[in-house]
Image (spheres, grey):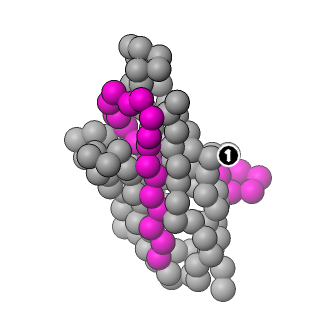
Amino acid sequence: QVQLVESGGGLVQPGGSLRLSCAASGNIKSIYNMGWYRQAPGKQRDLVARITRSGRTNYADSVKGRFTISRDNAKNTVYLQMNSLKPEDTAVYYCNADLASADYGLGIMGYWGKGTLVTVSS
């Protein structure tokens, strides 16, 4: 079974930094796009950043210049470096990956981690 496990969330002061990691494991053939989403209380889940296999990135306007997404294909891991954090960044952050798994043969499926809570508060 494929699973995505996030780590690195926690409590941080405004202006501080956190680095989230998400490692994919299981019977993986190929990982394509990977990304981070977040959901604040009472809000919908929105894209924060995504990265393709070759390293092309997209960011939500609200995090451009502050967050950086990266990946290590050899480790099946995606990262989110978050700098200059603001209280409005508080949310549960979810890792997402589009991948092909031998468990289901051909085709690309989307997988989600369980989420990690990031709280930005003094």
The structure residue drawn at horizontal position 52% and vertical position 74%, both measured from the top left corner, is: 85
Q: Circle 1 — which element?
A: loop
Q: Position of residue 60 (x, y in %)?
A: 46, 53
In the image, 108 versus 42, the foreground residue is 108
Q: Is residue 45 above or below residue 14?
A: above
**In the rendered image, which residue does mark 1 sit on?**
44
Q: Residues within 10 Å of mark 1 (few under 14, many from 20)?
A: few
Q: Is residue 10 left or right of residue 51?
A: right
Residue 48 vs 111, above or below: the answer is below
Q: Is residue 108 visible?
A: no
Q: Is residue 63 above or below residue 36?
A: below
Q: Is residue 52 visible?
A: yes
Q: Nearer the viewer, residue 81 or 89?
A: 81
Q: Point out residue 46 in the picture as x, y percentages from the top left corner.
A: 57, 47
Is residue 68 left or right of 10 when viewed as pictured?
left
Residue 35 drawn in magenta:
yes
Q: Which residues are magenta?
A: 17-43
From this viewpoint, which residue is outermost toward the right? Answer: 42
Rendering coords of residue 27 (x, y %): 42, 29
- 110 lies above or below 91: above
Tell me the residue at 40%/57% (across/down). 79
- Disc 1 marks a residue whose amino acid type is Gln
Residue at image x 64%, y 62%?
Answer: 117
Q: Quadrant of the C terminus?
A: bottom right
Give the main secondary structure of the magenta stretch: strand
Q: Residue at x 61, y 51 (%)?
A: 115
What residue occupies the far top of the structure in this picture? 106
Residue projecting furthest to the left: 54
